[in-house]
Image: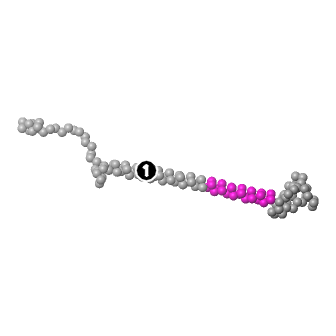
Amino acid sequence: MSRYLEIRQQVPRRQNVRRRAAKSPGKDGRPRWTVLTLIVFLILFAAILSVWSSGRVVNLGYLIRSDVIEKQRLIDERNTLNLDISRLKSPEWLEIEANRLGFVKPDSNQYIRVEAGQKRTSRTQ
């Protein structure tokens, strides 16, 4: 037995230390958890980008709709103003307004006829 004790004393003792299990590397030598984490982040980024772009499309749709409504309102206003211009230029309306303001029709001797290109020299005739 003494021989056994001598050999046992010469051999270093192993300490009971828990060792982490070695991670199996991927094909490129990196641990698999790094590659999986990268994949998860890429998927998360794609999902966030998709939600952001969808929100942007909806927001642009609202802006386009409000611009279409504004355009239609402006077209209606333009049509109303064109009708007002036509009404205000009509001779019938001008005559009614002139009578309301107290204007009277001139006599035949109160007309002054000016030809195109002719200069008027004096007011009295």
Q: Could you tell me the amino acid type at mark 1?
A: Leu
Q: Position of residue 4 (x, y in %)?
A: 8, 38
Name the residue at 53% across, 52% down.
55
Name the residue at 77% across, 58% down.
85
In which quarter of the view is residue 8 placed?
top left
Please tell me which residue lies in front, 10 or 101. Answer: 101
Q: Position of residue 77 (x, y in %)?
A: 72, 56
SS category of the residue bearing label 1: helix
Q: Residues within 10 Å of mark 1 (few under 14, many from 20)?
A: few
Left or right of 22, for residue 58? right
In which quarter of the view is residue 113 placed?
bottom right
Q: Position of residue 96 (x, y in %)?
A: 87, 57
Count of labels in the image: 1
Magenta region: 65-89
Q: Position of residue 119 (x, y in %)?
A: 83, 60
Please tell me which residue lies in front, 60 or 54. Answer: 60
Seen as rendered, the residue at the extreme front is: 121
Q: Is residue 44 visible?
A: yes
Image quarter where the C terminus lies is bottom right
Name the residue at 8% across, 36% down.
6
Please tell me which residue lies in front, 16 or 28. Answer: 28
Left or right of 65, for residue 82? right
- In the image, residue 52 sits, relative to residue 116, either above or below, namely above
Q: Which residue is mark 1?
A: 44
